Image (tube, rainbow, N blue to C red):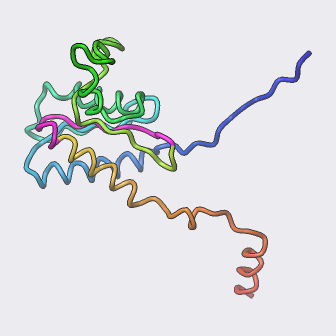
């Protein structure tokens, strides 16, 4: 009988705290440009972590924001890239009706990546496509600004642990 090999990966995950940080930055950006928005943040599988409907945001944009976040996370690319390739006669024509119509080809959805791994997505809706993209980008940039540098993430070596012990003594 062949030996069973279990394969796993140690990928980063978006936490609720990280999703809230992204949401807060995106909502601040929407407020600063004077456009109340529906904003959704999902995990890498497209599952909703946080949602915010700002006062005055369009009710019709709730599902759009969630679907933009889902598309960005699951497709692993910004939703505005699909607008260019999903028109009639283009290679991805018809993709917008896939996944029970949930697939968004309108800008405002961005994947959230950490260390080269997509950990989620953000979707913003209620403004123009450019405004939606700006607000989404503000959320992504807030998380990127809080990530420790690669040097800070290194595990301590036996040598550096020894130096810390001697410093405490």
In this view, the residue in front, 111 or 27, is: 111
The C terminus - image quarter = bottom right
As displayed, is residue 14 above or below residue 165? Answer: above
As displayed, is residue 142 above or below residue 110? Answer: below
Q: Locate residue 126, reporting x and y percent.
A: 13, 35
Please state the extent of the stretch shown in magenta in the rendering.
Answer: 117-131
Principal secondary structure, stretch drawn in magenta: strand
Quarter of the image where one finds residue 37: top left
Q: Locate residue 143, reporting x and y percent.
A: 38, 54
Residue 50 visible? The answer is no
Q: Left or right: where does residue 54 sit relative to residue 123?
A: left
Q: Left or right: where does residue 3 sit relative to residue 166?
A: right
- Is residue 60 covered in magenta? no
The residue sitting at 16% across, 48% down in the picture is: 30
The N terminus - image quarter = top right
The residue sitting at 28% across, 15% down in the picture is: 93
The residue sitting at 22% across, 29% down in the picture is: 106
Q: Locate residue 66, reporting x and y percent.
A: 28, 29
Q: Locate residue 78, reporting x and y percent.
A: 32, 36
Quarter of the image where one finds residue 68: top left
Residue 16 visible? The answer is yes
């Amino acid at each position: 009988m062949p030996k069973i090999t279990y394969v796993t990966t140690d990928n980063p995950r978006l936490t609720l705290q990280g999703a809230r940080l992204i949401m807060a930055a995106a909502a601040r950006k929407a407020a600063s440009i004077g456009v109340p928005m529906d904003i959704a943040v999902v995990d890498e599988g497209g599952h909703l972590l946080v949602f915010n409907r700002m006062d005055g945001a369009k009710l019709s944009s709730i599902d759009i924001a969630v679907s933009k976040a889902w598309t960005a996370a699951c497709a692993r690319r910004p939703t505005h890239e699909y607008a260019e390739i999903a028109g009639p006669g283009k290679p991805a024509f018809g993709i917008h009706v896939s996944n029970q119509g949930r697939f968004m080809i309108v800008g405002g959805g961005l994947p959230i990546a950490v260390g080269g791994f997509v950990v989620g997505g953000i979707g913003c809706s209620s403004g123009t496509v450019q405004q939606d993209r700006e607000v989404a980008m503000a959320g992504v940039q807030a998380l990127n600004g809080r990530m420790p540098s690669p040097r800070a993430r290194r595990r301590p070596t036996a040598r550096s642990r020894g130096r810390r012990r001697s410093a405490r003594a």
